Amino acid sequence: MGDILSQSEIDALLNALSSGEDNVMINNEEEEKKVRIYNFARPSKFGKEQLRTLEVIFENYSRLVASFLTGYLRTATQIEVANAEQLTYNEFSNSLLNPVILGIVDFSPMKGSIIVDLSANVGYAIIDRVLGGSGDTLKKTREFTEIEKILLSRILTQSISYLVEPWENVCHVSPRLDKLETNSQFAQIMSPNEMIALVTLSIKLGEVEGLINFCIPHLVIEPIMDKLNTKHWFAGNEAESSNFRNQVEAKLETAKIPISAVVGRTTITVDEFIGLQVGDVITLDSYVNSDFKIKVGNLIKFYGKPGISHGKNAIQITSLIGKED
């Protein structure tokens, strides 16, 4: 049995016949519908724009922490953002090799925690530098001692505090190091199938190179996902810059500056200076009717005449000195 024509196709055929057309083209093909593939086992919860914003945030964070470590460890430190991607927490945890340096960070006021993963070789180099060494790493990995964990906790606590400023344009956060783990099995803070954003920073401490990974669960930053875009971030930056400029201008307007009026100048010898007595007259380089030079700081900005205002000595400005003068 042949294909059955639909009512619209029959109407089109009758209209074509009545108009005298010989060749009638009936399109039987339905428009193709675009189907978006969705992986329920690994759903996409971070858009490209949101991952890019995270890169921008951590680029600012990298500069702050690099300056801190350079001054604290007295050695050149370079930190750059290498990548930002989304994956499951199980994929992240399976990539960790013991011993590890995992900082569980309370990301208040967000509900939940994020994880900071520091390469073990960089951790050894930091400890060596803090204890007065040259910043070399160990050739063979071993477990960290309790004293070394305390030293690393102090460094991580200070480094994490620098997260506040880069996140300020998105939301105000108060990160706090909750605990330090050196075994990845004790850092199961979420479901293995939970999606996370993994921001990877490359660090070079002297001659030692490694990585710093920030594991940010989607559940933690879900309330602020709509703000996680570069447009909002840069808009916040512009608003902050404008506010900062207004504050500076307000401070400048109320700042006090020294102003002095120079009656005149002259030069005398040391012998003449020693011989000065009461009643002596010192001749200046100006006349009685000459205008005084009015200085703002060390610069001559105005000319003026002396007088009295409300019973106090005063100077009346008679002319301004421009840049060309």
Image (cartoon, grey):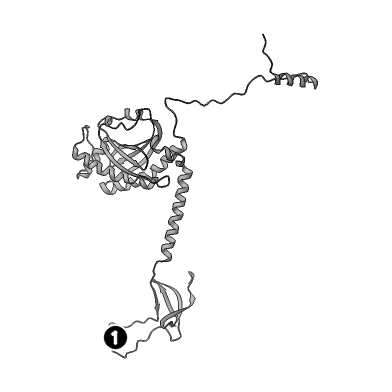
Residue at position x 36%, y 46% in the image: 164
Q: Name the outermost residue toward the top.
A: 1
Q: Is residue 77 visible?
A: no
Q: Is residue 246 above or below residue 3?
A: below
Q: Residues within 10 Å of mark 1 (few under 14, many from 20)?
A: few
Foreground pick, 194 / 230: 194
Residue at position x 40%, y 78% in the image: 261
Kindly indicate the quadrant of the structure image that contains residue 223. top left
Residue bearing the label numbered 1: 272
Say which quadrant the N terminus sits in.
top right
Residue 177 x %, y %: 29, 41
Q: Is residue 288 above or below residue 39?
A: below
Residue 199 x %, y %: 38, 37
**Horizontal placement of 4 versus 57: left or right?**
right
Residue 95 x %, y %: 32, 29
Foreground pick, 202 / 8: 8
Indicate the secondary structure of the residue bearing disc 1: helix
**Horizontal placement of 115 versus 308: left or right?**
left
Kindly indicate the quadrant of the structure image that contains residue 27. top right
Amino acid tagged 1 = Glu
Q: Is residue 83 visible?
A: yes
Q: Name the outermost residue toward the bottom.
A: 279
Residue 31 x %, y %: 62, 24
